[in-house]
Amino acid sequence: MATIDIHNLSGEKVGTLDLADEIFGAVNEDLLWEAVKHYRASQRAGTHKTKARWEVSGSGKKLWKQKGTGRARIGSIRSPLWRHGGTVHGPQPRSYDYTFPRKKLLGALRSALAAKLADGKIIVVNAFDVKEPKTKEFRKALDALKVNSTVLVVETPKHENRNLELSARNIDGLELLRGNEVHPYHLLRYDRVIFSQPAIEKLQVSLQNSVSKRQHKPKEDESAKKATSERRRRPRHDKAAEVA
């Protein structure tokens, strides 16, 4: 079981936290790619649109008679064949979102946490005790935690910390999220992640409940596996020969 240090906002170590291997152990890059692709697709506005021939401006009167002029037949100046005419098979408003299995999303979240831990990019603080809503003071706390790049700050869902919100919203490259809003995309987008201790503990419990029971099943002892294989290879005695 891995452990991680717990710091306060002054950068001092105040304890350690045990991390579950089934959450912070393995990284599935294919699953991360799928989760990020789904998130970015769901964020697309899908408001693109072109005008068809019945939507562009212009008269619908036939320009000249059908036959006898020697010119190509034409019914309207709004034809797609003409300049300023309608567009054929152009993009129309649509939603790019699609169904993504919840188990795969939670698996991708575990992989993203494991990747961040392997890179040493996760920081845990005991609490975000921001006494005053001042950006300058919170910036000092980030400097004490040696954060000089983009950072994701995660707090517990039910903990209302107005001073933290006001202090963090004006810092460039910082995003504040609740624990139930964290997505693998957020973890991969930002260089560092700062969890409050209650937030990472609650997230760890939630992800442990989502882990498949097969992963909790202990591995069979090597001696037992060897005995089983030998028993399967042992030839069966002929009952007729035994009777004789």
Image: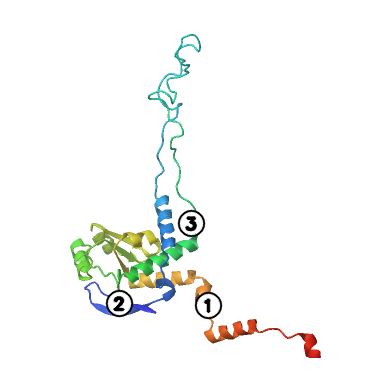
Q: Of circles 2 and 1, which is in front? A: 1
Which one is nearer the viewer's eye here, 67 or 232?
Answer: 232
Residue at the disc numbered 3: 100
Q: Is residue 47 above or below residue 135?
A: above
From this view, report whether residue 211 is shown above or below residue 64.
Answer: below
| Lateral position of residue 136 relative to residue 205, left or right | left
Quarter of the image with the C terminus in it = bottom right
Give the secondary structure at mark 2: strand
223 or 50: nearer the viewer: 223
Q: Dot 1, how many residues are within 10 Å of its Cα: few (below 14), some (14-19), or many (20+)? A: few
Picture coordinates of residue 226, whole percent (x, y): 56, 84
- Identify whether 14 is placed above or below 158: below
Name which quarter of the figure residue 167 lies in: bottom left
Q: Amino acid at mark 1?
A: Lys
- Ranked by sequence position, the earlier of labels 2 and 3 is 2
From the viewer's perspective, is 240 left or right of 154?
right
Q: CA distance from mark 3 to mark 1?
A: 27 Å
- The residue at 78%/88% (across/down) is 241
**Marks 3, 1: nearer the viewer:** 1
Circle 1 residue: 217
Is 109 drawn above or below residue 98 in the view shown? below
* Disc 3 residue type (three-letter): Phe
Residue closest to the far top: 68
C-beta proximity under 8 Å, tags 3 and 1: no
Whole-number angstrom distance, CA of label 2 to CA of label 1: 29 Å
Residue occupying image coordinates x 36% and y 72% = 198
Q: Which mark is residue 27?
A: none
